[in-house]
Image (cartoon, grey):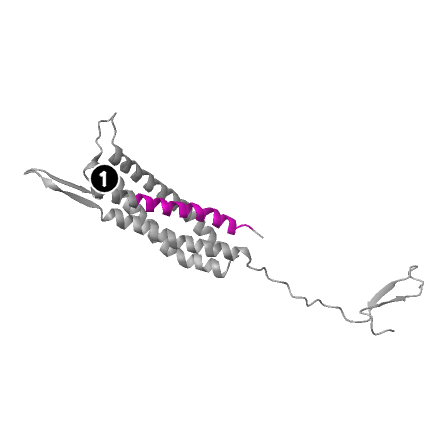
Amino acid sequence: MDSGKHSEATTVTKPETKDKGKAVTWAAPLSGYSVSTKAVPHPRPGWKKGVAITDFILRLGAIGAALGSAVTMGTNEEILPFFTQFLQFHAQWTDFPMFQFFVVANGVIGGYMILALPFSYVCIIRPHTIGPRLGLMIVDIVMMGVATGAASSATAIVYLSHNGSRDANWIAICQGYTNFCQTSSEAVVLSFVAAISLMCLVPLSALALKRT
């Protein structure tokens, strides 16, 4: 027989007997089985690694914006140079409940972003991991709502401070507290930057969870 063939089979026929009227046929391999040793290729990171790097950079920007807005608003106060015997004109962020919520919310968002950096880095090293990415996306959605609410409520107070309301007979206090209103406006802008960063992080996480 030719040795170059992988496997052959021989047919052996048992002659007919008196007890059984049928012939039995056996097929036996003459050579060993062939085993495939081809390696299974691992999936390449590809574009998911780029998404993870973008996620990490956006989180760094959100940290600066959230903590910057919290510190800016938390140190915001102004005392007018004139006062009377019984009254001193003093404006401080603690005088407005919306500003208090604003400072706490942005502080929490900044702290969360710092804690999320190691998980974001893990997603860079292992772009195809699902657990950390799914957890980040869920908490990002919650923080996006908190950031949007804090920035929106503070924006309403800043708008009334600048323009007042004729219907409610509210005067625009920014005519006197110029520095206080300007600092409040800067803090609100930084807060919206953090909110927009979170809005970008959510679809990025959803895109990274997509199977290739």
- At 33% from the left edge and 47% from the top edge, which residue is drawn? 190
Instruction: Judge by depth and name the residue closer to the eye, 31 or 44.
Output: 44
User: Which residue is label 1 attached to?
Assistant: 96
Hey, which quadrant is residue 46 in on the image?
Answer: bottom right
Which quadrant of the rendered structure holds the N terminus?
A: bottom right
Q: Identify the amino acid type marked 1.
A: Phe
Q: Position of residue 167 (x, y in %)?
A: 25, 25
The reply to whether residue 129 is visible in this rendering is no
| Residue 157 included in the magenta stretch of the image | no
Q: Element at badge 1?
A: loop
Q: Position of residue 5 (x, y in %)?
A: 82, 70
Hey, which quadrant is residue 47 in on the image?
Answer: bottom right
Q: Is residue 139 left or right of residue 44?
A: left
Q: Which residues are magenta?
A: 187-210
The reply to whether residue 175 is visible in this rendering is yes
- At 43% from the left edge and 51% from the top edge, which residue is drawn? 136
